[in-house]
Amino acid sequence: MAYLQILVNGVVLGALYTCLAVGFSLVWGVLNIINMLHGSLIILGGYLTFFAWHGFGIHPLVALPVVALVLFAIGYLTQLLLINRVVSEPVLTTLTLTFGLDLILYNFMTVYYTATPRRVTLDLGVVEISGIVMPVDRLLAMTLALLLTGILYVVLRGSRIGRAIVAVRMDRDAAALMGIRVDRIYAITFGIGALMAGATGAVFAMMYPITTNLTTTFLGKAFVVCVIGGLGSVQGALVGGIVLGVVESLAGQMVGPQHALTVGFALMLLLLLVKPTGLTGIRGYE
Amino acid sequence: MISRRWPYFLFAIWILALGSTPLWAGNYVVRLAITIAMFTGLTLSWNFIGGFTGYPSFSTAAFFGLGSYVGALAQRAGVPMVFAWALATLLVGLFAAALGGILLRLRGHYFAIGSIGVVEVVRLLIASWGSFTGGGDGLNVPFVAGGPDVVARIFLAAMVGIMVAVFATTVGVDRSRLGFGLRCIQQNEDAADMVGINTTIYKIAAYTLSALFCGTIGAAYASWTGYIDPNESFSILMTIKVPVMCLLGGSGTRFGPVIGAAAFTLLEEFFWANFLDYNRAILGAVIVVLIFFLPGGLLRMPYRGLGTRIGRPWVQPKAAA
């Protein structure tokens, strides 16, 4: 029964990892950019949610869509005004640029919010189903994470903009010939990436204390999930997230929690070498 | 011939200026000179893989940190300082060669992620292996005897010496078949392979060269500061700062890394001193300006077209690489 509990914990964690990585994966897949800003955007979303709750008494569930939209605007403008200028340059240039932007955002967040951990406390209690204990706020977070990921999947599959994004990913030049404005699609995609990051931050703030020290940890998780599951598809992020969550839970139990991170990264390096397309092996959004 | 030689004269003057700081300036300037020499060495090292070969490697911090830990542990075990540095160089070189054989099969984004992953794995292993490496508490390294002035002179001489050694290696590689082959790989790896360059061996050589002196510098740094810990030694900031320095000067050139490392270190020092709270943000702004307005670095700056570049509000993105 202990292992069932660990498994359930792992899946809950994995759902959050999926939500955390899916925006990063989308940006990498469509724009061919490793977005070093992602970790800081998550924290920004978490902070905005916390301050809405703490300062104005707005419930996180109400704040979440607003925060997500604010982050979308930030991401859209960042891509439109800055990153689009160098989007076709080699990885070194784009990665360095997003890292520079990350330094700026990180610095301002540390100055204005300080690094003090902050958390939204909802106190929803605990449920117990046949011996498996689960706090309700975690269940809520998991549901939200999966719901958001699901919405993204539906948007990419069903909407005009979603199809345009997939088209740009598959063949940029052909998409341009079909009348798709590639620069706008890039900006929208980056905006969606930021939106997912902000929503993840809002969900995280309900479960864990938020602090700027976590930005690199989140970014590292996004790397690992993308590589494990396969790049640039929602299904890939889902598989990668759940696998990472379960592996970390198991490793935390068996070799101690301080090694859980190492195991995740080691798994990533191994998969990079054996199967760079990830476990799902899906190359697109089809 | 004068025009081809004058950079070397300037470089010689620069070495003399750095090396003679104890004679004409205080401890603060000497410390700055050591830092500049250290980062110049690291940046020149990165230039082998990132500049000549064009692989976006972000594993500098892994080599630097590993070197500092090997050096520190050897010194604690009673190995004399210089031998500890040599040992660190050797082991880090071997580590890079073995790692390169595996990691260099990846290209582009995957290589970048993999090389960052290496930094994290080595850092986490060292942080969690408490009994051997001191874990998160870090390690104390035996101090060099003789008071701060003597210590500063010793490490200034060491760092400048290493810097000159890396530069000499750079010139040697640039003139040799190896350098030519690496440039071919940078231009088009498949074509280089087709015309008979053993790309695997060449890439591993470049990767090992990029690590070798990082090991020495790491070990020397550990002896200099007398204390190391995993977060400081394997910082993600350093692993990106070094390529940024190289880009700032002009990557793939002989003098670019020297100019870039000096300019960046001085700028950073200035920001630390004047804008303590916002030094990271200013660093970020420097990076953004660098990417937009100095794509070829200071050496290849388009001095004539600068006005039109700034004035151009919108650039249509070209085909994604």
Image: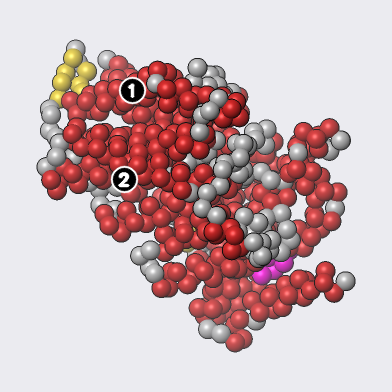
Q: Is residue B83 above or below residue B90?
A: below
- SS class, disc 1: helix
Q: Residues within 10 Å of mark 2 (few under 14, many from 20)?
A: many
Q: Residue at x 85, y 74 (%)?
A: B2
Residues at discs 2 and 1 both on one chain: yes
Quarter in which the C terminus of chain B is drawn: top right
Q: Is residue B274 above or below residue A179?
A: below
In the rendered image, residue B219 lying in the magenta stretch gets the answer no
Q: Most extreme residue toward the front, as rendered? A: A179
Q: Residue furthest bottom?
A: B24
Residue B144 vs residue A235, the one in the foreground: A235
- The answer to whether A263 is drawn above or below residue B285 in the figure is above
Q: Which residues are magenta?
A: B160-166
Magenta stretch, main secondary structure, is helix
- Whether residue A247 appears in this view of the structure is no
Which residue lies under the disc numbered 1?
A151
Q: Position of residue B240 (x, y in %)?
A: 54, 52
Q: Amino acid at mark 1?
A: Ile
User: The N terminus of chain B is located in which quarter?
Assistant: bottom right
Q: Looking at the picture, which amino acid does disc 2 mark? A: Leu
Task: Kindly identify which residue carries mark 2.
Answer: A44
Q: Please say whether residue B314 is visible from this viewpoint.
A: yes
Q: Which mark is residue B128?
A: none
The part of the image, by quadrant, that contains residue B23 is: bottom right
Tag in front: 2 or 1:
1
